[in-house]
């Protein structure tokens, strides 16, 4: 087993080595720009780390499928940013803000296909299964994004519905990255299942932590303005939970409804008011608990995979990075 | 070898049998709507017909990959309609006009992934090659669409550039459908190459005929308003050729430039003026010749495939349908 630094280095090198300096430039440049914005590269790192638990034979047959996961993820971000009207990402203009909607649609489409090109580097005897897994993951991510958009038009979302949505939108790809690593290492199904459950719980925790940090994070560390979700009435874990709690008190219910009506011109007042409500109704505290619950479930599932102590340690560190995050 | 009616029936049945009545409905319904709009279903018909030249064993392993080609094609149309601001297709509202841009982007993305799901039904020993071929085709189609958009901002396009663009945007997928049928029938490379060239020339002829019909077609037969390309200053075969011809006469050059400046409120005047110029400068006549040239080259390539007389006859009929079209 290689160190995490070596695995991470392989991922970074693979991403950096992709050149998009080709014609038509308007199609390929935005792809290079998007990949160049950086990020945690969680999905290829999870894929390669999982693979490396069982095999030290790391070459392009596994590196490229890992890269496919990141490329697919970044493609979805390009299109999500159009749908969400998000002008910035990681402090930089989003692709559509820089190149226009048409170009962002088409470059995203090309990036989705590029992901399949990378996936096609999987060993030939595994390519059918890898393709089916990748398709299954990808379609579910689209379903998750659709539900996320649907929720914006619905007055009240149950916590089960919310968790189902983030399972699709975020959990499936993180869990799927682990499944892909396991598939390419050809490990037994029972171990894959346990690791996939570890991935799903880590992914859920990752998303709730993302919701939490958007409201209670440190702007300098988080890398984007705090409170964006509040301003946009985004149905996050916090808001979904808060809506249910506020429903049992007429005054809290009115307070929340009034705050949600405030527009961009009352940005600071809205953020301050909603944060106070989250604190007073115990939503902030319980979000922290929900995140820890995901972490605990992830480690429980991990134990069922019966890894070596070094292997387990490695996956615990990755769960920590996903869940105990500040950015 | 089955009759063309049987092959066409298999395609129609496969398309009709896909159900998109599943959750989230906002994601899947537009896909069903798009596939329900009809169309010539040229690509799966070409794929299955090519396969059937060499094998009568037609089952889901070949029908679904053929369906993948149509699904990919229709996905590109959903996204193209957004980029082109086209409110109608086949006399019906386009997906984005009906469901909004965000939904059209996401349903298109899901449809692209669905195409890969269908492709994954290819026989397992061929799936790697089928995936590589499909990726290669798909990426080139995106490149073609990008060039098409790029051309809108360029003053003068050479005929070589134009032909290169339609080869990518239209030719590659038609030729690729034939390659997919040949790949799945596992026929020798030399025959595949000849049939692919037949497909490329038919595809080029198909596109120039499309340009021609948009300007000189019969509205009732063509199914959409005649003159749309002229109104939008679309760089078609006719306009590209006309610009070069008009350049050699100051008065023609001015006449064309003035016509191109007319906006939607002078629609009829613009269409009439540009059509006259096309006729007077011999562009209309030569477009017809260019289409016939593609047809001749397609049949030349077909002869190199050395098919049986029945097989050749079948492919000639398909070339006729693609090139000698009125709609």
Image: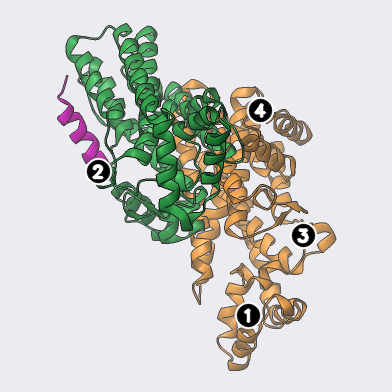
Chain colours: A green, B orange
* Residue B130 sits above or below residue B243 on the image: above
* Marks 4 and 2 belong to one chain: no
> Mark 1 — residue?
B260
Q: In the rendered image, which residue does mark 2 sit on?
A: A221
Q: Name the residue under label 3.
A: B224
Q: Position of residue B273 (x, y in %)?
A: 73, 82
Q: Do labels 3 and 1 share a chain?
A: yes
Cα distance between the residues tagged 2 and 3: 55 Å
For the stretch drawn in magenta, the main secondary structure is helix
Q: Rounded to the nearest whole Å, what is the CA distance between mark 4 and mark 2?
A: 41 Å
Q: Which of B262 and B217 is in front in this view?
A: B262
Circle 4 residue: B22
Q: Nearest the camera: A72 or B169?
A: A72
Residue B326 pos. (x, y %): 78, 58
Q: Which of B216 and B108 is in front in this view?
A: B108
Q: Please, what secondary structure does the residue beneath circle 3 have?
A: loop
Magenta segment boundaries in residue numbering: A1-15
- Marks 1 and 4, how far apart at CA: 47 Å
Expressed as whole percent of the image width and height from the top left, the position of residue B113 reads: 53, 35
Chain bearing tag 2 is A
In this view, the residue in front, A274 or B294, is A274
In the rendered image, residue B55 lying in the magenta stretch gets the answer no
Give the mark nearer the N terminus: 3 vs 1.
3
């Amino acid at each position: 087993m290689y160190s995490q630094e070596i695995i991470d280095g392989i991922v970074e090198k693979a991403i950096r080595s992709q050149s998009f300096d080709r014609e038509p430039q308007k199609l390929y440049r935005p792809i290079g720009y998007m990949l160049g914005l950086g990020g945690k590269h969680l999905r290829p790192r999870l894929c390669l780390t999982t693979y490396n638990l069982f095999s030290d034979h790391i070459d392009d047959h596994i590196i490229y499928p890992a890269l496919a996961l990141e490329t697919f993820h970044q493609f979805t971000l390009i299109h999500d940013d159009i749908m969400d009207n998000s002008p910035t990402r990681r402090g930089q203009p989003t692709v559509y803000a820089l190149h226009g909607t048409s170009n962002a649609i088409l470059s995203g489409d090309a990036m989705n296909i590029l992901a399949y090109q990378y996936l096609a580097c999987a060993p030939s005897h595994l390519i059918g299964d890898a393709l089916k897994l990748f398709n299954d993951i990808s379609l579910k991510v689209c379903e998750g994004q659709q539900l996320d958009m649907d929720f914006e038009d619905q007055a009240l979302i149950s916590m089960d519905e919310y968790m189902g949505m983030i399972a699709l939108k975020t959990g499936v790809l993180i869990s799927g990255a682990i499944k892909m690593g396991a598939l390419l290492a050809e490990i037994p199904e029972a171990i894959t299942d346990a690791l996939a459950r570890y991935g799903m719980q880590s992914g859920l925790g990752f998303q709730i932590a993302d919701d939490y940090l958007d409201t209670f994070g440190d702007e300098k560390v988080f890398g984007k303005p705090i409170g964006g979700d509040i301003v946009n009435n985004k149905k996050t874990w916090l808001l979904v939970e808060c809506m249910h709690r506020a429903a049992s008190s007429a005054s809290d219910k009115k307070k929340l409804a009034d705050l949600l009506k405030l527009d961009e011109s009352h940005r600071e007042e809205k953020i301050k008011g909603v944060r106070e409500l989250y604190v007073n109704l115990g939503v902030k505290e319980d979000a922290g608990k929900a995140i820890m619950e995901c972490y605990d479930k992830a480690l429980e599932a991990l134990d069922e995979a019966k890894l070596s102590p070094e292997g387990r340690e490695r996956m615990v560190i990755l769960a920590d990075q996903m869940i105990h995050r500040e950015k």
